[in-house]
Image (cartoon, grey):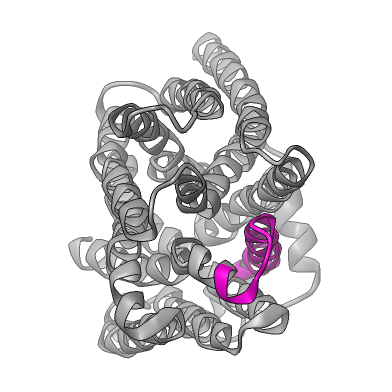
């Protein structure tokens, strides 16, 4: 199990760096292209739409080719998305969003398939949470190193460095393929109907429906946070390096928190109450973000953002382990892909609505407030589900 966890941790880290760089470098890109900040939300909305399609169709490919092979494919795709971004303009970033997030979206379902098979069930939330700390680790690296590299290489050179890192690690995974990909079914058929089958399999189970709605809300808030936080800070008067550094410090909070929530969900509290607490924490923190003004001290902004990071950036392991637990044998990748596809719907809709509200109001407050609504609904739904499960038991 340790080898699988380490391999998936490094795979997710590389992919996470590549996906966060457009947000971290957005102020430089916006200044060069004379674009409106609301286009950041449009970019991440397109990326989420591409990821939605990729995750819905990922199950059959994982079964047919194996989790390690599809992880390699995901890394190559992520690197390709970063590479085509250097074209610049609308064409470059449309291609970047689609290439870097479509096929690349198979990375998390592939990781779930591998861990679902190798992890001991009792410790699954903990194992999944450790692996998923790779995402904030990658965001931390991107947030801290991206602006520094951009000072000497420019944003295009920084994108290319990220692409090369993804491609290199795809090669480094090759020796593990024979050791960990022990269950591929080369004759497994790939059908267009897999998209519909995946959605139906998720919606047919009450617990999976609840997880899908939670993933919609959680991933939507996370997408807004990643897409806009650095740009929001620069609007408050921070320079890019300072904003990137603060972003990295705040994201670092998510690393121990992901492990903490997984540890609680594995050994002390059922996952549903933990996710309810995370949902209410997100709601409180985004409402606080809506109240921030240029007069707030950095310490207060950082404290608010740390709560947001500890919740909106820290739910992945416990939610994905629950999806894998509820999946039929051998279908963990497909089921988690289905649940995550609803998350991509949230990652498409929330930044898009946020961008629209930003354009209409010329401020960030309305967008942050909007993000609290789905979080509160998820918190209520999770508490209701926990109560029903307790009665059934």
Give the x, y percent position of residue 324.
Answer: 48, 48
| Numbered disc total | 0
Residue 166 visible in the current orientation:
no
Q: Is residue 31 left or right of residue 135?
A: right
- 349 over 17 or under it: above or below: above
14, 170: nearer the viewer: 14
Residue 42 painted magenta: yes
- Residue visible at 46% across and 84% down in the picture: 156
- Residue visible at 28% across and 28% down in the picture: 264
**Stretch of the chain drawn in magenta:** 31-58
Picture quadrant of residue 263: top left
Residue lying at the far left in this picture: please name it: 2
Residue 151 painted magenta: no
- 149 over 333 or under it: above or below: below
Give the x, y percent position of residue 305.
Answer: 39, 35
282, 263: nearer the viewer: 282
- 13 over 247 or under it: above or below: below
Residue 339 visible in the current orientation:
yes
Q: Is residue 143 left or right of residue 256?
A: right
Give the x, y percent position of residue 382.
Answer: 56, 22
Q: Is residue 226 left or right of residue 123?
A: right
- 296 over 383 or under it: above or below: below
């Amino acid at each position: 199990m340790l080898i699988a966890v380490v391999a998936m941790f490094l795979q997710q880290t590389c992919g996470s760096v590549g996906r966060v760089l457009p947000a971290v470098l957005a102020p430089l890109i916006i200044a060069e292209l004379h674009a409106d900040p609301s286009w950041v939300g449009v970019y991440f909305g397109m990326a989420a739409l591409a990821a939605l399609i990729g995750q819905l169709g990922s199950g059959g490919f994982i079964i047919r080719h194996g989790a390690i092979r599809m992880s390699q494919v995901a890394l190559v795709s992520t690197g390709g998305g970063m590479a085509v971004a250097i074209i610049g303009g609308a064409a470059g970033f449309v291609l970047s969003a689609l290439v870097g997030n479509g096929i690349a979206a198979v990375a998390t379902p592939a990781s779930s398939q591998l861990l679902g098979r190798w992890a001991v069930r009792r410790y699954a939330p903990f194992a999944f949470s450790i692996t998923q700390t790779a995402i904030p680790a990658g965001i931390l690296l991107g947030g801290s190193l991206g602006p520094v590299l951009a000072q000497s290489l420019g944003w295009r050179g920084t994108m290319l460095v990220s692409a090369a890192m993804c491609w290199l690690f795809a090669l480094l995974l090759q020796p593990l393929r024979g050791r960990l990909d022990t269950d591929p079914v080369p004759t497994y058929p790939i059908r267009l109907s897999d998209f519909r089958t995946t959605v139906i399999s998720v919606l047919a189970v009450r617990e999976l429906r609840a997880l899908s709605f939670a993933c919609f809300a959680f991933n939507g808030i996370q997408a807004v946070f990643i897409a806009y936080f650095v740009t929001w800070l620069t609007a408050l008067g921070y320079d890019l390096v300072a904003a990137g550094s603060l972003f990295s410090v705040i994201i670092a909070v998510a690393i121990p928190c992901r492990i903490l929530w997984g540890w609680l969900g594995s050994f002390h509290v059922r996952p549903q109450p933990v996710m309810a607490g995370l949902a209410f924490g997100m709601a409180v923190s985004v409402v606080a973000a809506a109240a921030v003004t240029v007069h707030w001290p950095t310490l207060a902004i950082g404290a608010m953002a740390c709560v947001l990071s500890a919740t909106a950036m820290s739910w992945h392991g416990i939610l994905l382990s629950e999806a894998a637990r509820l999946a039929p044998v051998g279908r963990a990748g497909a089921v988690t892909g289905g649940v995550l596809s609803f998350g991509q719907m949230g990652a498409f809709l929330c930044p898009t609505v946020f961008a629209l509200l930003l354009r209409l109001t010329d401020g960030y407050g309305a967008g942050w407030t909007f993000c609290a609504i789905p979080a509160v609904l998820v918190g209520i739904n999770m508490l209701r589900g926990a109560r029903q499960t307790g009665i059934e038991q």
